[in-house]
Image: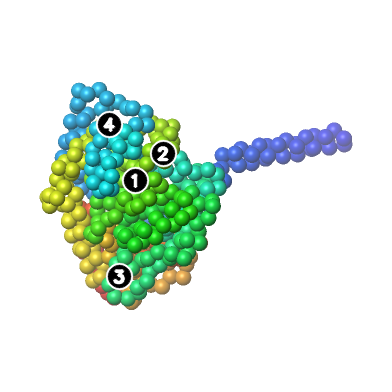
Amino acid sequence: MCQKTGRMSACAFLILMVTWISESRANKFDFPAHLVGTNSSVTDGLESFIEQYNPVDLGVDMLDEEAPMHIKEALVNATLSHDPIINQMIPYKPLPRFARALAKFYSPLLGREVIAEEEMIATVGATGGVFDAIQGHTSPGDEWIIIQPAYTMYVPMIKMAHGVPRYTNLVLRKRSGKISSQDWVLDREQMESLFNNKTKGIILNNPLNPLGKVYTLEELEFIAGLAKKYDTLVVSDEAHEFITHKPHIRIASLPGMWERTIAIGSSSKSFNVAGFRVGWAYGSANILNNLKAVHARAADCAPFPQQQALAVAFEQELRDIGNPNSFFENHRRDILVKRNTMVEAFEKAGMRPIVPDGSFCLIADWTTLKSKPLWKTKDAGLDFVKWLVKNVGVFGLPVSSFYSEGHEYLGENFVRYCYQKSYKTINTAVEKLRKLQKYR
């Protein structure tokens, strides 16, 4: 009996040990606790659904036509260059010609001479620039203020740095008639209430994705005033800076802001070359040094051949300032035509588009459809996205996905659509949206 009992006890102990080891191993390889919540979104599971119905994809802001020929030619020439450095790298530093081209281009826009060697850095895309800025300036517990709706990458980056995201929401002040992105305004009282001695900075996206809002001078002065009052940084993500239909003011150019602003640009949005993965950041040398340190240890450098091609592109734009046929001006006009086409298409379909003043995205209110199906789920916006894909054949992103957990309801009446597409894609989308007219 004792021997039998002993064997049973040993078996039970072995089972407990195996279970403990299995659970420990599972826990050990779980997603990091401080990042939980960043590994999922309201759009999870949409990929297979999209593949099933093959709609016109206006959800992703990616061009579906050729990149500009002069930039492709510049990249070919860079790759074939006999200058050995162009196909090599200098750890954490930008290609000197690229840094000089950026400095010369931005200096007159900022009203100051930008020092290429100290105040410019090339990053792995604009997203990489934001990452370097947050990683380089965040200690555990530091707080960053995010203006919602917001680009979805900001929160994960803050959490990766063990920072704390705080949220302020734009307020729609107009509910009828023609509405533009300027009708979404700062909640100034709410924003200022978030600033405290733990605040490291505020992330400004200008123009703002997904709204296409271009901040006014008064709004920027208000944000700048808070940054100076509470001694914080401003990370100004200006990826869409050259796609605006009203004056774009750089917050770094305002009095007292150069010393506390990290501004970030994007070749993806500026020149339609998302595959280049080159962005840039500029600012005062003392705050840019932190970015350089992170960049050196996370990516070494952005690809030099692409930097060389972009240097050629910026040099051309500098020569073409004031020329109505420059690439930037032609690009801006082309985007404006596409914007107006999509605004008209959504209006005729019975939805209410929010007319953007910048970027190449717009959001549209789908609740204006009179005979639409009514959903009573957690995210009606996501349900509408699926319904539109299935019944109309056009895909967009629910604006709820641009809000943090607990604030999704603020975006559930809206869907974001990107119109930086070929005219073939735009025209196909317009044709499909006509199916919505029966729901007017």
Could you say which disc has been placed on residue 179 in the image? 3
- Given residues 66 and 109, the one toward you in this image is 109
| Residue located at (43% from left, 32% from top) | 297
- Name the N-terminal-most of marks 2 and 4: 4
Q: Amino acid at mark 1?
A: Ile
Q: Is residue 149 above or below residue 437?
A: above
Marks 1 and 4 sit apart, C-alpha to C-alpha, by 18 Å
Question: Quadrant location of residue 355?
Answer: bottom left
Q: Are marks 1 and 4 in contact (CB under 8 Å)?
A: no
Pointer 1 or 2: first along the chain: 1
Element type at mark 4: helix
Q: Nearer the viewer, mark 1 or mark 3?
A: 1
Q: CA distance from mark 1 to mark 3?
A: 29 Å
Mark in the foreground, 1 or 2: 2
Q: CA distance from mark 3 to mark 4?
A: 45 Å
Q: Position of residue 335 (x, y in %)?
A: 21, 56
Q: CA distance from mark 1 to mark 2?
A: 16 Å
Q: CA distance from mark 2 to mark 4?
A: 19 Å
Q: Which secondary structure, mark 1? A: strand
Amino acid at dot 4: Pro
Q: Secondary structure at mark 2?
A: helix
**Which residue is tagged 2?**
286
Indicate the colouring scheme. rainbow
Residues packed near mark 1 inside 10 Å, few (<14), some (14 to 19) or many (20 plus): many
User: Which residue is at the front of the view, 403 or 174?
Assistant: 174
Residue receiving disc 1: 264
